[in-house]
Image: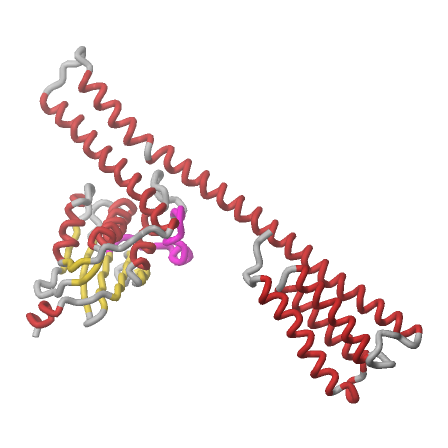
Amino acid sequence: MKKNKYNNKIQYGGSIGLVLLLSILCYAGTTYIGYKVVAYILLLAVSLLAMLFDIKPVLCAAILSALIWNFFFIPPTFTLIISNTEDSFLFLMYFVIALLSAVLSAKIKKAESKARDKAEKEKTIKLYNTLLNSLSHELRTPIATIIGAIDTLQDKNIHLSNSNKESLLHQIDRASIRLNGQVENLLNISRLESGFLQLKKDWSDINELIYLTISKLENAPSHPIIFKENPIFPLFKIDAGILGQAIFNILHNAATHTAEGTQINISTAYTDTQLFIVIEDNGSGFPKESIDFVFDKFYRLPNSKTGGTGLGLSIVKGFIEAHGGEIFLENSNANGAKFTISIPAEVSHLAKLKNE
């Protein structure tokens, strides 16, 4: 059962305090409402407490409210003796209903907790299967390529030309990069979920960072990337490695899921406290119904290419939020996808003086 967010002292104090407060207010107005109405008010309080607190503090409130109702409100007052059968029956019913309310509410909360745990377990299993299925392809394919190419190179019975050897080495290189990317994604999502991600901020040249990131994109030749560099741009105090990985994941996603020849544009802007990076392509964009989900872990667009773990954009969001920033996705006027990154960051004073 899920542990209540309130500790025992708060629960007992809140239960007793609410019963006493309502009892005082009801006692002041007994002349107008009558002692039977007081029972309904106290029962309502016990029911509300049962929805918030654990069973023991609620049982305490139920017993206390019953005794207070008997002692201060049921005639003759200031005694636990009840003079007539009807009031005795009412008191017994009050006591039973108050206890039942506490017990049943506790059972309902326990059942809800079990249902939540079951749903979370099923969701975890589903995500695990999704990840396993994705990894079985994403990791197996480059590993098989590397092993196959190495076996061919090592086979002395096969005579290879220099061009064939270069081709095999190129295959190994591409497969290694792909394999490394998947391992990096797994490590990054693990760091984000564990809360162990620690930013190492330092003054960084955003222009240089973007050029370096573009150079790492292996399928860039089939997708021209246009970076509208601002030659007079300040330095920003960021974690260049983390931000670079976020930019790389967006570029890689665009290059992977758009047709060859699709152009990717990158532009930057800033204020005295904010860095903006816009990455936009002229592809087919995202379905409107999917835009709200693309940053979810393991989410992949319907009818998208086989392969991929659905982690790339969720890592992007995590890395940007680790900087205290935000990322937005929309379909641009050119029908392509447009990612806008906004990061609060310290700007170098030297650069600002140059701009002035």
Q: Is residue 168 above or below residue 116?
A: above
Q: Main secondary structure of the magenta part?
A: loop
**Residue at coordinates 73% horizontally, 74% vertically from top-left?**
42
Query: Which residue is nearer to you in this view: 21 or 150?
Result: 21
Q: Position of residue 172 (x, y in %)?
A: 20, 29
Query: Which residue is nearer to you in this view: 243 or 27?
Result: 27
Res. 202 image quadrant: bottom left
Query: Which residue is nearer to you in this view: 22 or 193?
Result: 22
Q: Position of residue 177 (x, y in %)?
A: 22, 37
Q: Position of residue 34 (x, y in %)?
A: 80, 84
On the picture, is 21 further left or further right than 190?
right
Q: Position of residue 349 (x, y in %)?
A: 12, 70
Magenta-colored span: 281-300
Outermost residue toward the front? Answer: 79
On the picture, is 4 further left or further right than 294?
right
Res. 158 image quadrant: top left
**Residue at coordinates 68% horizontally, 76% vertically from top-left?**
20
Q: Is residue 163 above or below residue 113?
A: above
